[in-house]
Image (cartoon, rainbow, N blue to C red):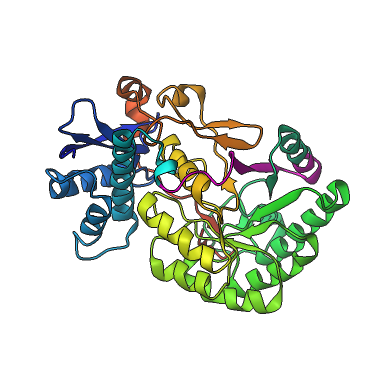
Amino acid sequence: MAKITDVQTIRTRSNGTWVFVKVLTDQPGLYGIGSASDHYRAKTVVTAIETIAPLIIGRDASHIEDIWQSVYTSGYWRNDSIINTVQAGIDMALWDIKGKEAGLPVYQLLGGACRSAVPCYAHAAGDDLPALEDDIRRYLEEGYPVVRCQLGPYGGGGFLGDDETQRPKNAAPQKRSFDDEAYLENVPAMFAYLRDKLGFGPKLTHDVHEHLRPHNAVNLAKLLEPYRLFFLEDLLSPEQVQWYRQVRQQCTTTQAMGELFINPHEWTPLITERLIDYVRVRVSKGGGITNCRKIATLCEWFGIHTAWQEGGDNDPVNQMAAVHLDMVCWNFGIQEENHFRPEEYEIFPGHAVLDGGHLYPNDKPGLGIDIDEAKAEQLMDPDKSARSFFMAEDRRADGTIVRP
């Protein structure tokens, strides 16, 4: 079997926020790639990969589970976002190698396809209700089975201008303030409008993006019950997931959670107590294909579905890893869609194809996706990639940061 001879990093996108692992072997031309992207900590991830690489060089590339466990405990402390991302990148690359050695796509190695393609949900938005309605109709006409509905940015419907709120006299300048009560007023009104215009046929979701105080989050879930959402996304922050017990007691609004999860103590209680309906862990933050397959299996026995997280900062390799899991998991629910620019797609021959609201893998061995390193290097903008990136800060009227 192939031995690991080197672990390399490839950093790309114009702003340098995409990071990939390339695991080389002693077999000519045999290597694997995996996603280790972190929009906010790309340089840190690269350093972490270089630190961990000596641990696995010389090992048998087929020992995926053993290498996963070894990396998991390699720094003693574990379950943090950086090491999970490194671990996932290595894990995906090893599955890519195993598939190439077997001459089979990864989803075949995981048990074979349960479905023909992967249905996705689109991201519709508008600054007002008619614009949002038009965007939803556009996605429905394209063939998307589910559409997410947002009034402008995350927290939209809850933002007030200076002339609409009372702020302290010594408050620091800010363009807008997030207000829980405004959100509780406007988001149910949004769905009342949409159901009146579109009916109950279209499957609709909404992303709270953890903006609300916990008691108001429970209230929102209850207020949205009459509009029969496909799911309500990220209603609570990871620090407040115990409030899902109150949500279940109050209403039947379907819950999707997990975009920020990195620790089994976060998702396990929600699954085993049946407090959510969809798990939304990002594959690269959940530890890769090996661990997310285990999460999906746990979900199956408790009637929970998967909806692996994507989002605009994600990359085509992580998307492809999610697609392989989607193809084999019986309890798959829906996949978040993602769009990339033509010059970004050119870097990744064999990328998943998004068409008519569905993602299609290919039948190539391994993950089925490769990376053109020359084009990846050309895409990098030295000035943009030298910058540091931070999560946008929304604040309440008194200046308190809203936790996303």
Q: Is residue 302 above or below residue 199?
A: below
Q: Position of residue 367 (x, y in %)?
A: 39, 36
Q: Residue furthest right?
A: 196
Q: Is residue 64 magenta?
A: no
Q: Position of residue 309 (x, y in %)?
A: 51, 50
Picture quarter with the N terminus: top left
Q: Position of residue 224 (x, y in %)?
A: 75, 64
What residue sits 50% from the left and 53% below the top? Answer: 393
Q: Is residue 332 above or below residue 380?
A: below
User: Is 175 or 91 nearer to us in this picture?
Assistant: 91
- Residue 311 visible in the picture: yes
Q: Is residue 127 magenta?
A: yes
- Residue 240 visible in the picture: no
Q: Is residue 267 above or below residue 312?
A: below
User: Is 379 or 271 nearer to us in this picture?
Assistant: 271
User: In the visual, does 376 lie left or right of 193?
Assistant: left
User: In the visual, does 117 lie left or right of 238?
Assistant: right
- Counting every numbered tag in the picture gives 0
What residue sits 29% from the left and 48% below the top? Answer: 86
What residue sits 36% from the left and 26% below the top? Answer: 381
User: In the visual, does 54 lie left or right of 203?
Assistant: left
Q: Quadrant of residue 15?
A: top left
User: In the visual, does 267 lie left or right of 218?
Assistant: left
What residue range appears in magenta?
Answer: 110-133
Q: Is residue 178 above or below residue 312?
A: below
Q: Position of residue 49 (x, y in %)?
A: 23, 45
